[in-house]
Image (cartoon, grey):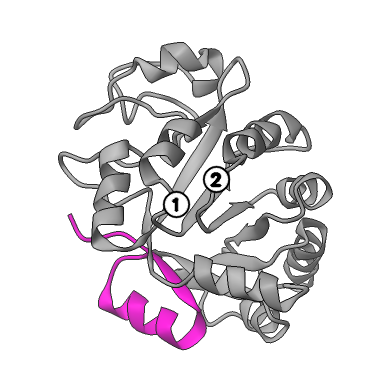
């Protein structure tokens, strides 16, 4: 949980506005593209984005493991170097950005959640790339992941950065699921949760909130989602209807 008034203030600053899920994307502004980030900044909202590691270890802004859905290319992000990925066109406009590209465009003008896509225990390469890209970045930012090893890495090596655990309970509400979530939260040393709106209300999220963690919820798309989030979370990560 936040350990000082200054850390709590930074957490409040991070979550001051709703977060646009993968940017404020639409027909001419593909998800996780620079145009989607610019649209969110123009609205005055925060941004949630995803990063994966390129073959040469750079943080690439892209959600899927494979390129197929969002580009005309095939294969995985991790099979290509950053320079090659930056030349790939996104369906709808623009090209795949690096995290450094995205940070330059956002320029500290929006609260930023960076979801680190690093499965397994070998997270150091991508976490180090994210940390390097964030050197000197002045805006409010939090790093988060489904993988608690990501939070653990940042707690040990970049403890000033806010850390989050992404959670989807998926009906796993038995003893084993509850224990696993609690252990993940402790291992991640999280300042905030990002939980699936479909799981709310959640005893796990409520318990974390009572301990001082912020609770953000994804992906909010409907009026019913918004009402649920307002009752049980501190901020939303939203998408607008197509």
Describe residue 28's horizontal placement relative to residue 149 as left or right. left
- Identify whether 53 is placed above or below 28: above
- Identify whether 36 is placed above or below 172: above
- Identify whether 135 is placed above or below 146: above
Which quadrant of the figure contains the N terminus? bottom right
- Identify whether 86 is placed above or below 48: above
Using the image as rendered, state which of residue 201 and residue 163 is in the foreground: 163
Q: Position of residue 231 (x, y in %)?
A: 45, 88
Span highlighted in magenta in the image: 220-242
At 35% from the left and 75% from the top, the residue drawn is: 225
- Whether residue 173 is visible here, answered yes or no, is no
Which quadrant of the figure contains the C terminus? bottom left
Q: Magenta stretch: residue 230 in it?
A: yes
Using the image as rendered, state which of residue 202 and residue 40 is in the foreground: 40
Q: Position of residue 233 (x, y in %)?
A: 50, 79
Residue receiving disc 1: 108
At 34% from the left and 50% from the top, the residue drawn is: 23
Q: Position of residue 76 (x, y in %)?
A: 49, 20
Using the image as rendered, state which of residue 56 and residue 205 is in the foreground: 56
Q: Secondary structure at mark 2?
A: loop
Quadrant in the rendering for residue 33: top left
* Residue count near mark 1 (Cα–Cα under 10 Å), binned few <14, some 14–19, many ≥20: some
Q: Magenta stretch: residue 19 in it?
A: no
């Amino acid at each position: 949980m936040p350990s000082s008034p200054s850390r709590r203030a930074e957490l409040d600053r991070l979550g001051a506005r709703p977060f646009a899920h993968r940017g404020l994307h639409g027909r001419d502004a593909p998800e996780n593209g620079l145009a989607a980030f610019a649209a969110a900044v123009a609205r005055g909202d925060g941004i949630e984005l995803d990063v994966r590691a390129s073959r040469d270890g750079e943080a690439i802004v892209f959600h899927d493991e494979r390129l197929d859905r969002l580009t005309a290319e095939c294969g995985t992000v991790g099979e290509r170097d950053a320079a090659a990925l930056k030349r790939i066109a996104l369906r709808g406009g623009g090209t795949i950005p690096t995290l450094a590209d995205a940070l330059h465009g956002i320029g500290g003008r929006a609260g930023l959640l960076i979801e680190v896509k690093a499965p397994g225990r070998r997270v150091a390469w991508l976490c180090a790339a994210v940390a390097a890209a964030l050197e000197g970045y002045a805006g409010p930012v939090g790093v988060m992941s489904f993988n608690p090893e990501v939070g653990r890495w940042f707690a040990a090596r970049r403890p000033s950065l806010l850390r989050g655990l992404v959670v989807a309970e998926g009906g796993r509400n038995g003893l084993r699921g509850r224990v696993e979530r609690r252990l993940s939260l402790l291992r991640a040393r999280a300042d905030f949760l990002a939980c699936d709106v479909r799981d709310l209300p959640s005893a796990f999220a409520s318990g974390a909130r009572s301990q001082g963690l912020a609770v953000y919820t994804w992906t909010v798309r409907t009026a019913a989602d918004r009402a649920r989030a307002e009752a049980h979370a501190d901020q939303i990560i939203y998408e607008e209807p197509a």
